[in-house]
Amino acid sequence: MNDKTLSAAEIADLRSLAGMIVPPSAKYGVPSADDDMIVADIVASLGRDTDHVRAALATLRTLAGGPFAELDAERRNDVAVKLRAEGGAPVRVLTRIVLLCYYRDDRVMLSLGLELRPPFPKGHTVEQGDWSLLDPVRARKPFWRPVS
């Protein structure tokens, strides 16, 4: 395991917590954030935030007194509430990543009535603004070194 990869125990705890952050909805036909594809996306998307997520998961494990994923539902809920109150920035980072990955899942996008496509190259219509607002910038003397 390198320093940017979560352990199996960390992934199990992350999966359990993610499922609590975004539960499934039968009404909208969407999975919870503990779905295999979504968890795989979360783990693959950690990047520079791995240390924050690892810190949040360590705090989670400490509050749980062991593996969070092995707790019963009631105790997991109590620990998650305490984590949210005491976890600080690492928990906010973890929550942000879970939500970002959840809302880019195709099933979730379809349930929201959105097309399964990136915003570009098809693009979106953007209203034209007042281009004269750039006149002071255009009039400014160049502050960069010219290329020879």
Image (cartoon, helix red, strand yellow):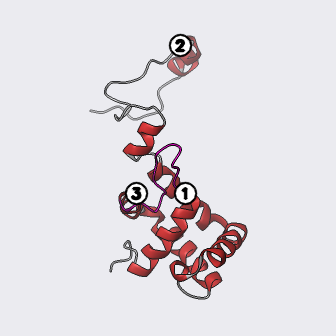
| Closer to viewer: mark 1 or mark 2 | 1
| Closer to viewer: mark 2 or mark 3 | 3
Q: Earlier in the sequence, mark 1 or mark 2?
A: 1
Which residue is painted at 43% across and 34% down in the image?
A: 144
Which residue is painted at 40% across and 75% down in the image?
A: 6
Q: Position of residue 50 (x, y in %)?
A: 45, 68
Which of the 4 image quarters holds residue 61?
A: bottom right
Q: Are marks 1 and 2 in contact (CB under 8 Å)?
A: no
Q: Where is residue 83 in the image (x, y as percent from the top left)?
A: 66, 72
Q: Main structural element of the magenta stretch: helix, strand or loop?
A: loop
Q: Distance between the residues labelled 1 and 3?
A: 12 Å
Q: Where is residue 5 in the image (x, y as percent from the top left)?
A: 37, 73
What residue sits right under mark 3 in the picture?
A: 38
Query: Please, what secondary structure does the residue beneath circle 2 have?
Result: helix
Query: Please, what secondary structure does the residue beneath circle 3 have?
Result: helix
Q: Position of residue 1 (x, y in %)?
A: 32, 80
Q: What stretch is highlighted in magenta?
A: 23-36
Q: Which mark is residue 23?
A: 1
Q: How far apart are marks 2 and 3 (CA)?
A: 42 Å
Which of the 4 image quarters holds residue 7?
A: bottom left
Q: Which amino acid does label 2 sit on?
A: Trp
Looking at the image, residue 142 sits to the left or right of residue 78; the answer is left
Question: Does residue 24 show up magenta in the picture?
Answer: yes
